[in-house]
Image (cartoon, rainbow, N blue to C red):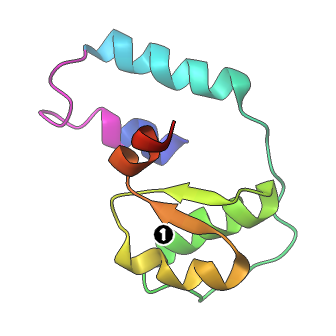
Amino acid sequence: MMEYADVLHRPGLISAFSTAEIDEFVDSVCAIAVEAVIYFRWRPFLTDPKDDLVFECALAGGADTIITHNISDFEPCRAFNVVHVTPADFLKKL
């Protein structure tokens, strides 16, 4: 969550939202999130070590979808029945 908050606060990335609005969004996500304890590591599994952390969290939390712009790097996750979609594709399916 810390990495997502850091990315959202990058200057110019989301200029339509104020810092306070971003903080409120992050707090809202944290309020409904369920902590998943990782008992195992699959590293190295993906090409980017930071992506491995996302994949491990998805597995530990029982997620079936990873929402990311980084589609190509998450392709191997399909072997574990974890699909990856862009944020736009995810919103279209809602």
Image position, residue 24 (x, y; %):
47, 13
Determine which residue is flagged by label 1: 50
* Whether residue 56 is situated above or below residue 15 in the rendered picture: below
Q: Along the horizontal axis of the image, is 8 left or right of 74? A: left
Name, please, the residue furthest toward the right: 39
Using the image, determine if residue 13 lies above or below residue 76.
Answer: above
Residue drawn at (51%, 41%) of the image:
2
Furthest toward the front, the residue is 93
- Is the residue 79 above or below the residue 71 in the image? below
The residue under the point 69% across, 60% down is: 64
In front: 92, or 57? 92
Q: Residue at x 21, y 30 (%)?
A: 14
Q: Position of residue 23 (x, y in %)?
A: 43, 18
Snapshot quadrant of residue 81 = bottom right
Give the quarter of the figure containing the N terminus: top right
Q: Residue at x 36, y 12 (%)?
A: 21
In percent of width and height, residue 37 lies at: 84, 55
> Relative to the observer, which residue lies in front, 42 or 77?
77
Question: Which image quarter: residue 61?
Answer: bottom right
Along the line of sight, which residue is nearer the eye, 94 or 22? 94
- Tell me residue 75's x, y (percent): 48, 81
Q: In the rendered structure, which segment of residues is drawn in magenta?
A: 7-17
**Is residue 74 depicted above or below 16 in this figure?**
below
Q: Amino acid at mark 1?
A: Lys
Q: Secondary structure at mark 1?
A: helix
The crowding category of the residue bearing disc 1, from other C-alpha atoms within 10 Å (few below 14, some 14 to 19, many at least 20), is few
In reply to whether residue 68 is colored magenta, the answer given is no
Q: Main secondary structure of the magenta part?
A: loop
Q: Is 8 in the magenta? A: yes
